[in-house]
Amino acid sequence: MRVLVGGGTGFVGTALTQLLRARGHEVTLVSRQPGPSRITWDALAKSGLPSCDAVVNLAGENILNPLRRWNETFQKEVVQSRLESTQMLAKAITEAPQPPQAWVLVTGVAYYRPSLTAEYDEDSPGGDFDFFSNLVTRWEAAARLPGHSTRQVVVRSGIVAHALEANHVQGILNGVAPAPTTTNADFARALASALGRPAFIPLPSIVVQAVFGRERAIMLLEGQKVVPRRTLATGYQYSFPELGAALKEVVA
């Protein structure tokens, strides 16, 4: 298929692009900057949707950008960045002479503390797993976030590819792993095992709050249990359904 990906230069978008191309699909990115196999958002607004079979939107301001204060201005930017990109793509799809067969909107990539991927600005790599693993590298130990009730999940770009390729997939899918039962302590032990390092240095919640602000820190300190029932029902098969194997793959 010919797939158009909005926000495809970020962490999740890069992984999705690599996966789609590995499966033989042709990928064009919508980005702020022009380049090979890219179009800009301005060009999309002026010229309309290029010929494609599917569209994915991952674009949006990085909600966990530690360089931005969590105030009303930034909150509006986070929301508006998602609304504008989605509205622009939706308008282009509606006006296209031959609309694409599939339209996937990623409305919130997991922030279940600490997740393996996060939401990203389209041209800014990095995220909460990078922040977490950087602490591990610096301290030479697996940092452990406080609390014991948080469930860990793994976001899979494969779910998006599955949604594009399987004609029967419709509606909302939870992009999480099927075994989200890991506590912070379990996560720390699994990551320490993958890194071959001890898991004994805790990361105080006050540090997370100082970096991200109290409201944003909730995303990292108070996760949710999310079960991908409909994702599994569509027939999607996870490459790494368990946390330990997923972490070893990421570290490798």
Image (cartoon, rainbow, N blue to C red):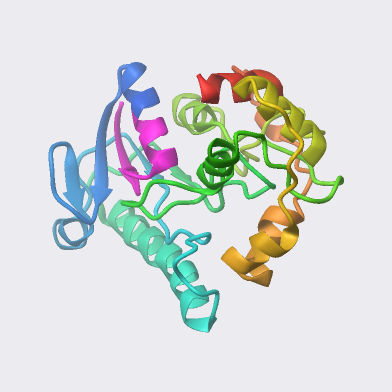
What is the x, y in percent for residue 171?
Answer: 60, 43
Does residue 81 sit above or below 156 in this rendering? below
Does residue 243 sit above or below 107 in this rendering? above
Going 35% across and 26% down the picture, which residue do you hit? 18
- The count of marks equals 0
What is the x, y in percent for residue 120?
Answer: 44, 52
Examine the rendering and report whether any part of residue 205 can be seen: yes
| Furthest residue toward bottom | 72
Examine the rendering and report whether any part of residue 236 can be seen: no
Quick check: 106 left or right of 101? Answer: right
Query: Magenta segment: does it hold 105?
Result: no
Residue 28 image-quadrant placement = top left
Q: Nearer the viewer, residue 134 or 148?
A: 134
> Quick one: quadrant of the N terminus?
top left
| Furthest residue toward front | 139
Q: Which residues are magenta?
A: 1-17
Going 75% across and 51% down the picture, which residue do you hit? 223
Q: Nearer the viewer, residue 245 or 104?
A: 245
Q: Nearer the viewer, residue 173 or 30?
A: 30
What is the x, y in percent for residue 15?
Answer: 41, 31
Residue 29 image-quadrant placement = top left
Going 77% across and 49% down the picture, which residue do you hit? 224
| Furthest residue toward right | 149
What is the x, y in percent for residue 141?
Answer: 65, 34
Query: Magenta segment: does it hold 3?
Result: yes
Quick check: 92 left or right of 190? Answer: left
Q: Nearer the viewer, residue 60 or 84?
A: 60
Going 33% across and 40% down the picture, which residue do you hit? 100
Quick check: 46 left or right of 95? Answer: left
Quick check: 249 left or right of 32? Answer: right
